[in-house]
Amino acid sequence: MSTIVVDNISKSFGTKKAVDGVSFNVEPGGVFGLLGPNGAGKTTSIRIILDIFKPDHGKVSIFGGAMTEAMKNRIGYLPEERGLYQEVTLEKCLVYLATLKGMNEKKSQERISEYLDQFNLSDYRKKKVKELSKGMQQKAQLITTLVHDPELIIIDEPFSALDPVNTQMVKDLLREQAKLGKTIVMSTHQMYQVEQLCDRIVLIDRGKTVLYGKLSEIREQFSGNEIILRTESPLPTQIPGINSINSENGNLIYKAHLAEGVSPQQILQYLLSQNIILKQFEISSPSLDEIFIQVVTKSGEHDA
């Protein structure tokens, strides 16, 4: 059963339509990417999922039904904006926020102590939150998101202000949570993090769904018109079926752009028939950054 089912939701604020007919499902045991440029409708969609906003049209199902107060304790939410109490100590702040999620104080203190050790924050437990760096506060918010062992984890820009070491630690932690069968929804602008973590994505632009599905299938959908070649000797400048060919860094690695209607297999057969020795023949797969730019740009042209 899907943990989240978003069915054709729409939401307007005055004359501004923030979300316009968005639909997607999120399954347990994986990391789902909720992507889009600034102002695309991502945060509004998250707030509708969490029942902070009511949709004008459509509906959302969480854990097989409508959101209830009891369900909220099964959810961990990391907003992009920090929401920690600045004038109290880190430990007191975390314990208080954990009790709001239904944990008793003793249990929350035990779990928080474990997380403080894991996040290298134990030495700062008696420091006021306002005395912590931005990276430390981000780790503290992650602890608040995870401490009550939620079944559904929704995280908005989880790597904000984190250095590479802590970024890797958080990625490992999210992978562990996914392996435990948790459902994770991640919204971020860092496409390379999405490529490393997410198995499925939805891309929202101008409030509408413009791309949705398995990341591997989406990358395959956008690949096929370029190939990467590595040879033992220079390639001829003209090859039938190739519009352009460029040497990468001046060596014997080439990126070739195929003519319309020509398949990579046809090029491979031709090169072999010419007794060209290939050390590498690879269909070039575009990065998620490239796909993102291509799809959003196309969507903008269509709207214009």
Image: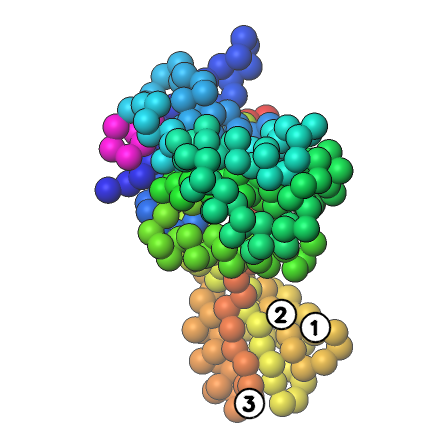
Colouring scheme applied when the structure was drawn: rainbow
Residue at 57%, 72% (x, y): give it.
228
Instruction: Name the residue carrying label 2.
Output: 255
User: Who is closer to the viewer here, 191 or 115?
Assistant: 115
The amino acid marked with disc number 3 is Ile
Evaluate whether residue 89 shows in this view. Answer: yes
- The answer to whether residue 296 of the structure is visible from this angle is no
Tell me, yes or no, whether the two marked residues, 2 and 3, touch with CB atoms within 8 Å.
no
Residue 277 numbered mark, or none = 3
Q: Is residue 51 above or below residue 234?
A: above
Counting residues from the N terminus, which is met first, the one under dot 1 or under dot 3?
1
SS label for mark 2: strand
The structure residue drawn at horizontal position 55% and vertical position 86%, both measured from the top left corner, is: 279
As drawn, 209 above or below 224: above
Q: Amino acid at mark 2?
A: Lys
Q: Quadrant of residue 226?
A: bottom right
Residue plotted at (64% across, 28% down): 85
Residue located 60% across and 69% down the image: 256
Q: Which mark is residue 279?
A: none
**Left or right side of 33 for 190:** right
| Quarter of the picture holding the C terminus | top right
Query: Would you name the residue on which mark 1 appears?
Result: 248
- In the depicted view, which residue is nearer to us: 266 or 224? 224
Q: Secondary structure at mark 1?
A: loop
Return the residue found at the far top: 14
x, y percent for residue 301: 58, 33
Task: Tell me the kind of residue under disc 1.
Answer: Glu
**Magenta residues?**
60-65
